[in-house]
Image (cartoon, helix red, strand yellow):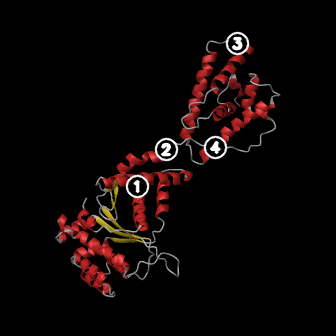
Amino acid sequence: MFSIDSFSDSTAADKSAIGFDYQYYFFLWKVLCLQCGQSAGLECKDDVHTDLDNDVQVLYQLKHTVKKSNSTGKPINLTTLDNDLWKTLSNWSKVIRDEKFGRISPVKQIEFLAKTLFVLTSNKSESNNNEVASLVDKTISGEVTARDLSSEIKAISNKSSSDSIANYSRDICKLSDEVLLKFIKNIKFELGENYIISKCHEAVKAKMLDEKDVDTAFKLVDSEIRKNNFIDVKSGQKIVISFDDFHKKYRKVFQRFQNAELVIYSFDEQLPNDLQGFTFVQQLLEIQEFDKDDFDQMVDYAEKMISSKKNINLWSDEGEITSIDLKTDEDNTILLWHNEWKSKYRNRNSIDESTHNDLALKIVDDLRKNVINFKSFPSNLSFSNGYLYYLSNSPKIGWRKDWSKYKK
């Protein structure tokens, strides 16, 4: 990959606070969007740059304005004779012919252009009357040839009385016709970029985060990168973050939300009048866990069962848990139950009813006294108990040796 540090370093300019923030958040957005094999830099090769995985580098110049159009209320247009526009083109032309890196001959300059793209990004609005942007389009389409390009640039700059723009134009036209043609073809404008922070939020959300966690995750990664940028600059290092660097240093920021414990929601549920219609209640009544007239106990258990069921359905519908997660926790819970059930009834081929119910109650008590060690479900005793009732309501588990009779 080509390096252009010498000239870029020499042209770093002081920026207002908002201009710097605009540049930083554009860099952060590019970092958040990195793919494997790519990297992004801040004030290294340009205001911002990205090195793509195909050995192509993209140089970004960032221009921010606080001026608004009186007619539209939007940021002012990027005009034909905008000083920032001409200064940017001039700076890029000097980068192309940077002698320190041996880019003196047109051959070396063309080699550099073969792997370099130039993007002017600004919150300034796009104008259909921008003659420079129009010239770029005409050059790309082939309407303007290499032979005419230099004179076209001079004709536009001559419309200004500014000495600065005249000087910038001369810098640009120092490139040979062929080099100038390839340079202009590699220019792109990204205007109206007024919502960089929103783009950062969208990039954070793309890390498969829930909407409610996006803002917090953004603030955390923003804070961490700002801190590490300060440390790098203080130690004399360039601010460049590769995909591998980002994954290594910042993946935990996103994983803390991706692996966050599920939230248990409350539901205002209207219970059915016939609670004994629930299979899990019938199973518990048979082993005399409570009396058939103990309505309060049945309500408590039914609320726990329904809460577990509704939360599972909600998590699944909202994408907070996958079908694989659901099956894993179900299979593990059934295995835990089966081990308890098997141990209680081992070698008990003939048992009286009283002993049978006592053994069944022991299984219930042993499984309910501690939170089940779920992989994905929350570590919550009420949910854990409700989940046992939920499985026994299906029924996929039971308490007596002959519990399978409840299967329909």
Using the image as rendered, state which of residue 265 and residue 70 is in the foreground: 70
Give the mark nearest the N terminus, 3 or 2.
Answer: 2
Q: Are marks 1 and 4 in contact (CB under 8 Å)?
A: no
Give the mark nearest the N terminus, 2 or 4: 2
Label 3 with label 2: CB-CB less than 8 Å: no
Q: Which residue is mark 2?
A: 256
Q: Are marks 1 and 3 in contact (CB under 8 Å)?
A: no
Q: Which mark is residue 351?
A: 3
Instruction: State if disc 4 and disc 2 touch (CB < 8 Å).
Output: no
Which element type, helix, strand or loop, lies under badge 4? helix
Q: In the structure shown, which secondary structural element does the residue marked by tag 1 occupy?
A: helix
Q: Which residue is mark 1?
A: 226
CA gap between label 1 and label 3 equals 71 Å
Residue closer to the observer: 292 or 11 = 11
The amino acid marked with disc number 4 is: Asn
Q: Quadrant of the N terminus?
A: bottom left
Marks 1 and 4, how far apart at CA? 40 Å
Residue 127 left/right relative to 59: right
User: Viewed as shown, does residue 33 lie left or right of 143?
Assistant: right
Q: Quote the CA–CA distance across marks 3 and 4.
A: 39 Å
Please identify, in this view, whether the residue under mark 1 or under mark 3 is nearer the observer. Answer: 1
Residue type for callout 2: Arg
Q: Residue at x 61, y 15 (%)?
A: 346
Amino acid bearing label 1:
Arg
- Give amino acid for label 3: Ile
Residue 336 position (above or below residue 353): below
Q: Position of residue 253 (x, y in %)?
A: 46, 47
Q: Which mark is residue 313?
A: 4
Marks 2/4: CA distance? 23 Å
